[in-house]
Image (spheres, rainbow, N blue to C red):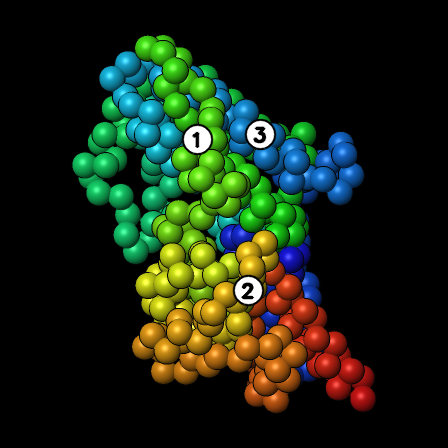
Amino acid sequence: MPAQGYLSPPLFASAWLFSPAQTSTAMPEPDTQNVVKPDPEPGRPEIALLHDLTRWREQLARSIARNNLGVRSEQIATAVNRILLSLLFLCIAEDRRLIPVGTIREMQVSCCSGEVLPAFLRYTQMLYPEDPPSAEAVDDFCDLVIDERVLPAILAALTSVDRHYDLAIIPTEMLAEVMQQYLARTVRRSAAHQAIIVDTHDTTQSGGTTVPPAPAIGYLVKSSLAAARTRYQSHRIWAVWQPHTYSRTQTLFKDFTTAFKDADEVIVTEVYAAREAKQDYSSQQVVDAMKHPSAHFIAGLKDVSNYLISNLRPGDVLLVLSAGDADSVSAKVLTHLKEAENG
């Protein structure tokens, strides 16, 4: 789903502010000094993003394996993913104006000036506003030796005008697929000084299905709502969430029951099955477990749209969180409001 409206949090959200006078879809003015060039294969920027992530994973994995002989395969994979996924989230946040434009460039300068990993960590702390990594974890991470040019080269690519993807406008489902494909493979140490990329055990067992790590999903939901609450403190915030796949909804059940505290009104739709077969499971169970004072289960998207049209008030902020087809909700609500506005 394309990121739209005033607020476009990482990976999956469209947001709209409803004013009594008009419905605005204006985004902040782009920074002309940080313009992303069109993709060389028009309409396929996600291919370029996945290519970069896989190429950088190989570079980082080989550098860590070569310079840290006592580090095991899973430790290499954890370090690589911590670096690349943190950079991806920061880049999404910057492209979507959730953090100051130029943050990645500042990080690039800091990482080129001396201690690479400590400088990197100072910037990625903003991804953990509620539960930052422990001091012990940070120390272990900073003990790793990485070739001094690897991380600065990745940052240079992310800040380059030749970058062929704008993470503010890549549709949500495409970003989800990129994450899915990236996480389907992992790092394995092949020799004392070498590392290779292989299918994960879960990917091999499931035939290609992977579940993103819970901290990533929790971060996306909570940061989306926290950003909306910070920006629109005096407004009523609605969160419409369409769970994506039965397996993911059940795996992250506990996280989802507590992720919506910053929303005043919560609507949960039925699960979007995607590639999975229909199951005897309903996201009503998630709503029943929520302690939120105003959480509602409304199965169908048409019924959700009608409920919003009847209950939204001027000044309300609506966030639609989905990697499926729930973007139709915001489209229908906006169409109705525009028609009403035009008489």
> Height in image: 296 above or below 158?
below
Judge depth for marks 1 and 3 and give the one in front.
1
First in sequence: mark 3 vs mark 2: 3
- Specify the farthest residue to the left: 136
Residue 321 visible in rendering:
no
Q: Give the amino acid type for the residue marked by disc 3 in the picture.
A: Asp
- Residue hosting label 2: 278
Q: CA distance from mark 1 to mark 3?
A: 15 Å
First in sequence: mark 2 vs mark 1: 1
Badge 2 local density, few (<14 within 10 Å), some, or many (20+)?
A: few
Residue 121 in the image: state x and y as whole percent: 34, 36
- Residue hosting label 3: 52
Q: CA distance from mark 3 to mark 2?
A: 35 Å
Determine which quarter of the picture holds residue 304: bottom right
Label 2 secondary element: loop
Name the residue located 66 percent from the left edge and 56 percent from the top edge. Answer: 2
In this view of the protein, which residue sits in the foreground, 225 or 187? 187
Residue 38 in the image: state x and y as whole percent: 74, 37
